[in-house]
């Protein structure tokens, strides 16, 4: 799965880092940790990449920060049952992407905030899982409205700094850990693309596993037009992957901002 650099100028973490061009396809990690604000964010952001790496033998870990309790348009929806349903959906999606551990921190949807407590929890996860690559929301994406996505991005970047330094959170009793790369999805300035041409169906199927989000997030209604809505949603995902892939000459890709100075 790993492509090698054609020149001696290769960066050790990926294959084609020539100046001014997109880098492509990280060396397949041994362990990857994806951190999303809500159930389904990870699948939208990097589902194809996780499926590709899982197929190549990477141990995948999903960390979902909030409980997803506000993920409905129905004001009468029982929130505790929605939380349980969304956790089941997240576990199913992870299996579709090739398996892996799923951890839920269960913080209140819509009220995610960066701070010492959040950094402690995510740094603990990084030090426990010890990933080569961490994936998360780009907190610097301009004009982003949802605060959870912004805060989730900063929690991850700040937790990486904490996890790598033994003087942060020594009460954890865990060794410091420095990932070799951070990939930020929905990137404000994409500089890296993963080829996911063989994993488009897996990404779509994993997204569709989040049935509670069909209407509010995916435009898939409950009525007679449901099958047409399914097709339209899958087409939207394919079109976005085409656009991302085009940045690096791939038929289908997921783009990121890659940070290697972790
Ligand atoms: Zn979200």
Image: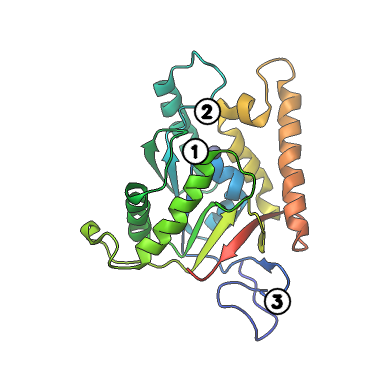
Residue beneath disc 3: 19
**Mark 1 residue element:** loop
Q: Position of residue 241 (x, y in %)?
A: 72, 49
Nearer the observer, 37 or 231: 37
- Structural distance between the alpha carbons of marks 1 and 3: 35 Å
* Protein image colouring: rainbow
Of callouts 3 and 2, the N-terminal one:
3
Nearer the observer, 51 or 149: 149
Question: Is 239 placed above or below 231 here?
Answer: below
Q: Is residue 208 visible?
A: yes
Q: Residue at x 76, y 38 (%)?
A: 235
Q: Is residue 190 left or right of residue 91?
A: right
* Disc 3: CA contacts within 10 A as few (<14), some (14-19) or many (>=20): few
Residue beneath disc 1: 38
Q: Residue at x 76, y 51 (%)?
A: 242
Which picture quadrant has residue 256?
bottom right
Q: Position of residue 161 (x, y in %)?
A: 40, 63
Of callouts 1 and 2, the N-terminal one:
1
* Marks 1 and 3 close (CB-CB < 8 Å): no
* Disc 2: CA contacts within 10 A as few (<14), some (14-19) or many (>=20): many
């Amino acid at each position: 799965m790993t492509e090698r650099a054609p020149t001696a100028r290769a960066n050790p973490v990926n294959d084609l880092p020539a100046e001014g061009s997109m880098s492509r396809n990280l060396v397949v990690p041994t362990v990857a940790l994806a951190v999303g604000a809500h159930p389904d964010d990870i699948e939208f952001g990097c589902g194809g990449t996780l499926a590709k790496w899982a197929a190549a033998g990477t141990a995948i870990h999903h960390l979902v920060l909030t409980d997803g309790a506000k993920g409905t348009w129905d004001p009468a929806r029982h929130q505790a049952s929605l939380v349980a349903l969304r956790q089941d959906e997240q576990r199913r999606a992870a299996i579709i992407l090739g398996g892996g551990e799923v951890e839920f921190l269960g913080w209140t949807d819509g009220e995610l905030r960066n701070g010492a407590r959040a950094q402690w929890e995510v740094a603990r996860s990084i030090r426990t899982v010890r990933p080569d690559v961490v994936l998360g929301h780009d907190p610097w994406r301009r004009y982003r409205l949802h605060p959870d996505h912004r805060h989730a991005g900063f929690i991850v970047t700040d937790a990486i700094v904490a996890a790598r330094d033994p003087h942060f959170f020594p009460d954890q009793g865990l060794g410091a850990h420095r990932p070799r790369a951070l990939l930020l999805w929905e990137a404000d300035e994409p500089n890296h693309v993963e080829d996911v041409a063989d994993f488009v169906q897996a990404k779509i199927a994993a997204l569709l596993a989040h049935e509670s989000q069909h209407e509010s997030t995916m435009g898939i209604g409950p009525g007679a037009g449901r099958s047409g809505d399914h097709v339209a949603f899958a087409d939207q995902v394919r079109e976005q992957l085409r656009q991302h892939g085009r940045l690096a000459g791939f038929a289908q890709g997921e783009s990121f901002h890659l940070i290697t100075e972790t």
